[in-house]
Amino acid sequence: MPVWTEDEAGPFQTIPFAGSSWQPEGEAERYPHEYIKNGTAKLLTLFEPETGLVHVKGVMSCTNVVLHPWLEGQLEQVLARLPVGTAAKLEREENRALWESWQAGLMVVPSLGPAEAELPALRMLLVLDNLAGHHTPAFIIWLFHHGIMPLFTPLGGSWLNMAESIQRILKRRALEGQHPSDPKQIIDWLEETAEGWNAQPTPFVWAGKRAARRERAWQKRHRLGGSGAVTLKPLPEQKRGKRLACVA
């Protein structure tokens, strides 16, 4: 079952972003203590951990009228590339049981409707944070109509959403050591960084609570973005003031 994750990063202000750099001894890089607040930018993110591909869009705000049309458009493109799969051949009862199996044990469960209601074939799982806007009835109905099962992370458990991992990486690469002058510049840098990432994406795998227990048998792992996501792909090291693990 294809799994995609969604999140919104930001707000990013027009302020100096600290970052590592090479400087002469005793002459540390200085950031201006004065800056003009020209607004903020946010980053809409749709991410597939299995492949590492990320779809992003920089915006000034991410209200429902901005987020939902963009997300629906991106999901339609993803669905168009997916094979029909075996779920399309299941009987009505088997298909509903498949939908319900992904709801077992969840704290927040969107209603699938009455038992006699027919559901489309389940084609994708979508992990989202547990925000009020994500529970908008029209949006949930749209997801169900297109065979997408929304899975909401629990309160205080947003680290379970790997979209946050890729957002930390994009933010670090695009903004650290920079002083943007306006939100448009922030958006351009973030979107260009995502485009560069997609040229050679890194798949993410789950580490979870048992990571320490498996560490003895699985030594070479590289944490991604400070969350539970890791990669098995060796990361080339790049020196930029300090030793950083960066994906090529």
Image (tube, rainbow, N blue to C red):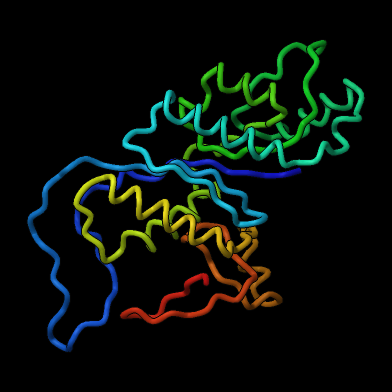
* 217 to the left or right of 121: left
Q: Is residue 236 above or below residue 189?
A: below
Which residue is rendered at x = 35% and y = 55% of the image?
Answer: 189
Residue 19, image quadrant: bottom left
Which residue is rendered at x = 80% and y = 28% of the image?
Answer: 121
Q: Is residue 189 above or below residue 109?
A: below
Which residue is rendered at x = 52% and y = 79% of the image?
Answer: 236
Q: Is residue 102 above or below residue 241?
A: above
Residue 136 or residue 219, whichever sits in front: 136
Q: Is residue 146 above or below residue 193?
A: above
Residue 186 or residue 11, whichever sits in front: 186
The percent position of residue 24, horizontal first and vertical second, equals 18, 87
Task: Locate the N terminus by quadrant.
Answer: top right
The percent position of residue 69, horizontal first and vertical second, equals 50, 27
Residue furthest to the bottom: 25
The percent position of residue 3, horizontal first and vertical second, equals 67, 44
* 67 to the left or right of 60: right
* 127 to the left or right of 194: right
The percent position of residue 120, horizontal first and vertical second, equals 78, 23
Which residue is rendered at x = 17% and y = 42% of the image?
Answer: 38
